[in-house]
């Protein structure tokens, strides 16, 4: 893949980027994109605000299709996540327009959190995608600069069009309590960070990574947040069957809602019932935001998986903890905790 020149921004879940109180972040993100030599193209509905996009999933879906059709766009990047991306399913899959656009114009897609759903949509269509960063969370970081680790990952990706390897971040950062204009120039509180931590199993394993936010995945099976979510996800075959997980590496990371251990356990049980842990070659666990429930999650992983031979690696800088790397989905990866690397073919 060649160097990325134009980034298309889509709001596939939350429409917060279009709100007036986000103007200081939007301006900051655009300036940083320009400094990186990137042109930004907002899809027609991306800045129409939270209320409009919450009421009009068909508009979000139309933007996704158009972003693939647009020949000028080299990378599709989400503004941020949210919580109801599953509502796009009928508008993307009831006709062949989405599949046709993706197959005629395959291009990289980058996002995380509830965007897990969009990654699984693209997986259905056979397109590799990229998990871990978004426009607001990375480019609009309120400090005087992007977080250095996140910037290195993003800059390398747009300059080369690929991710060659991932190594640990030397620091982790606490989440902000406020994102108002008064926070401009205020640094994140940082702490020394450990490396990739092998919880169990062999220190080295291979496979293509797939997965995402465990909160979002939980909603595929539980109607507590949205009553129609499990039925829609089942109807469109969103979550891969057990055989599709064979030999893959499962990625799981938890959201800013910091799910209680009871919910985390329930989500893991759904995955176990679907045969995921019996099929994958290993599991990568994103560092929880602010390290909340880190020890509890690790204990639950060992309890529910109940297979000490299955490799589980924790403290990956991905998802809702800061900083964030970019992990390719659908590309052969080798995890080596002794060398502290994840490399991609």
Image (cartoon, helix red, strand yellow):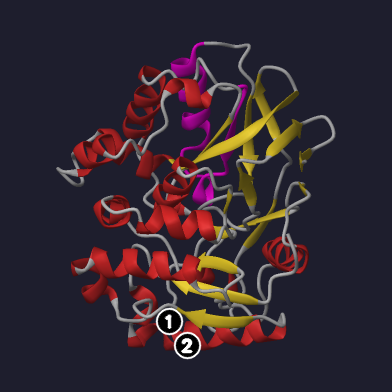
- Residue 98 at x, y = what percent? 39, 57
Instruction: Give the residue furthest to the right.
Output: 339
Between 234 and 209, the one nearer to me in the picture: 234
Q: Which residue is mark 1?
A: 180
Q: With respect to residue 218, does 319 lie above or below? A: below
Name the secondary structure under disc 1: loop
Residue 163 lies within the magenta run:
no
Q: Where on the picture, by quarter, is residue 23?
A: bottom left
- Residue 19 at x, y = what percent? 33, 82
Residue 285 lies within the magenta run:
yes
Q: With respect to residue 95, does 306 lie above or below? A: above
Q: Which residue is mark 2?
A: 24
Instruction: Give the residue furthest to the left.
Output: 227
Q: Which residues are magenta?
A: 281-306
Quarter holding the N terminus?
bottom right
The mark closer to the camera, 1 or 2, is 2
Q: Is residue 238 in view from this perspective?
A: yes
Is label 1 in contact with label 2 (beta carbons under 8 Å)?
yes
- Residue 158 at x, y = what percent? 71, 67
Q: Is residue 14 in view from this perspective?
A: no
Along the horizontal axis of the image, is 55 left or right of 139?
left
Which residue is located at x 34 percent, y 53 percent? 96
Name the secondary structure under disc 2: helix
Q: CA distance from mark 1 to mark 2?
A: 8 Å
Q: Bin the neighbour count of mark 2 within 10 Å (Cα to Cα): few under 14, some 14-19, many 20 and up.
A: some
């Amino acid at each position: 893949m060649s160097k990325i020149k134009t980034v298309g921004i889509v709001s596939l879940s939350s429409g917060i980027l279009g709100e007036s109180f986000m103007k200081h972040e939007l301006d900051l993100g655009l300036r940083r994109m320009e400094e990186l030599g990137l042109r930004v193209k907002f899809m027609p509905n991306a800045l129409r605000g939270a209320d409009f996009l919450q009421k009009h999933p068909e508009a979000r879906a139309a933007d996704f299709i158009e972003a693939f059709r647009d020949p000028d766009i080299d990378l599709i990047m989400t503004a941020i996540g949210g919580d109801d991306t599953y509502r796009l399913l009928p508008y993307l899959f009831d006709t062949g327009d989405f599949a046709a656009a993706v197959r005629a114009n395959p291009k990289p897609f980058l996002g995380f959190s509830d965007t897990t759903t969009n990654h699984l949509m693209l997986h259905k269509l056979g397109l590799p995608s990229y998990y871990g960063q978004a426009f607001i969370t990375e480019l609009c970081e309120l400090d005087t600069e992007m977080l250095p680790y996140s910037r290195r990952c993003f800059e390398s990706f747009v300059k080369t069009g690929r991710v060659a390897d991932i190594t640990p971040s030397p620091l982790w950062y606490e989440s902000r309590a406020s994102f108002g204009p008064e926070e401009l120039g205020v640094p994140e509180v940082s702490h020394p960070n450990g490396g990739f931590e092998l919880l169990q199993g062999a220190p080295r394993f291979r496979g293509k990574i797939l997965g995402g936010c465990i909160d979002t995945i939980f909603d595929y099976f539980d109607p507590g947040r949205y009553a129609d979510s499990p039925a829609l996800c089942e109807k469109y075959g969103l979550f891969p069957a057990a055989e599709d997980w064979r030999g893959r590496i499962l990625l799981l990371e938890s959201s800013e809602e910091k799910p209680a251990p009871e919910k985390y356990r329930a989500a893991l049980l759904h995955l176990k019932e679907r045969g995921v842990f019996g099929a994958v070659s290993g599991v990568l666990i994103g560092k929880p935001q602010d390290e909340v429930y880190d020890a509890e999650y690790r204990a639950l992983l060992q309890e529910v998986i109940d297979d000490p031979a299955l490799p589980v690696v924790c403290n990956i800088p991905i998802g809702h903890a800061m900083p964030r790397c970019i992990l390719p989905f659908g590309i052969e990866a080798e995890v080596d905790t002794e060398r502290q690397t994840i490399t991609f073919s």
